[in-house]
Image (spheres, rainbow, N blue to C red):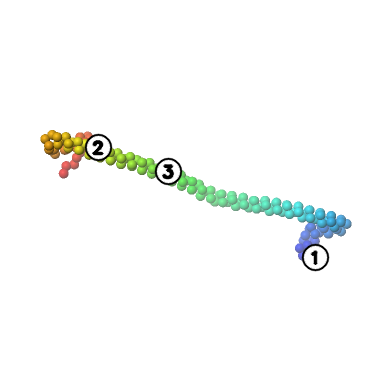
Amino acid sequence: MDSSLKPQENHFVALGQLLTGAGVPADRTEQLVTGMLAQSARETRLAVSRDICALVDGYIQGLDERYATRLDDAQKLMTKLTVELEVSRRRMRDERFSRSRTVIALILLQLLASAVMLVSLNFNGRATAVDVGSAADVALGPGFEVLER
């Protein structure tokens, strides 16, 4: 007899021998033992499946706990980066508008200075330092001074 089929180690073999000893026909004994083996295999498969699911769930829960803070940190970082990006966009837009205003102001000052020169050339053909200084005062507006050399 195979060592794996010893009656004291395998209860299915012992059951088969018990049924044969009780006078149950061999075909019926084989059918009963085969049915019990199939049922035992289904139960074992189900138990192993449940154990594997429990292990996987535990592993996933451990990963969730371990990486939950990292995910929160990543989301906080993304929020900070989004805010910084929006702030830098606004600064760039404001700087562009500020540069545009400065360029427009310089062009207007040049236009005004050209107009003052044309007017002074029409009167007597010469411009005096007083005329240019007063024209600069008018162009700059109140509160600004032209530095003298």
Occupied quadrant, residue 32? bottom right
- Which is more N-terminal, label 3 or label 1? 1
- Badge 3 marks a residue whose secondary structure is helix
Q: Is residue 146 visible?
A: yes
Q: Which residue is mark 1?
A: 1
- Badge 1 marks a residue whose secondary structure is loop
For residue 106, above or below residue 16:
above
Residue type pointed to by label 1: Met
- Which is more N-terminal, label 1 or label 2? 1
- Which residue sits furthest left? 124
Q: Which mark is residue 15?
A: none
Q: Which mark is residue 108?
A: 2
Mark 2, Cα crowd under 10 Å, few <14 / some 14-19 / many 20+, is few
At horizontal 82% and vertical 56% (from top left) the residue drawn is 30
- Which is more N-terminal, label 2 or label 3? 3
At horizontal 84% and vertical 55% (from top left) the residue drawn is 28
Q: CA distance from mark 1 to mark 3?
A: 79 Å
Residue type pointed to by label 2: Leu
At horizontal 73% and vertical 54% (from top left) the residue drawn is 41
Measured from the top left, where is residue 49 in percent x and y?
A: 67, 52
Q: Are marks 1 and 3 in contact (CB under 8 Å)?
A: no
Q: Are marks 2 and 1 in contact (CB under 8 Å)?
A: no
User: In the image, 88: left or right of 127?
Assistant: right
Q: Is residue 135 visible?
A: no
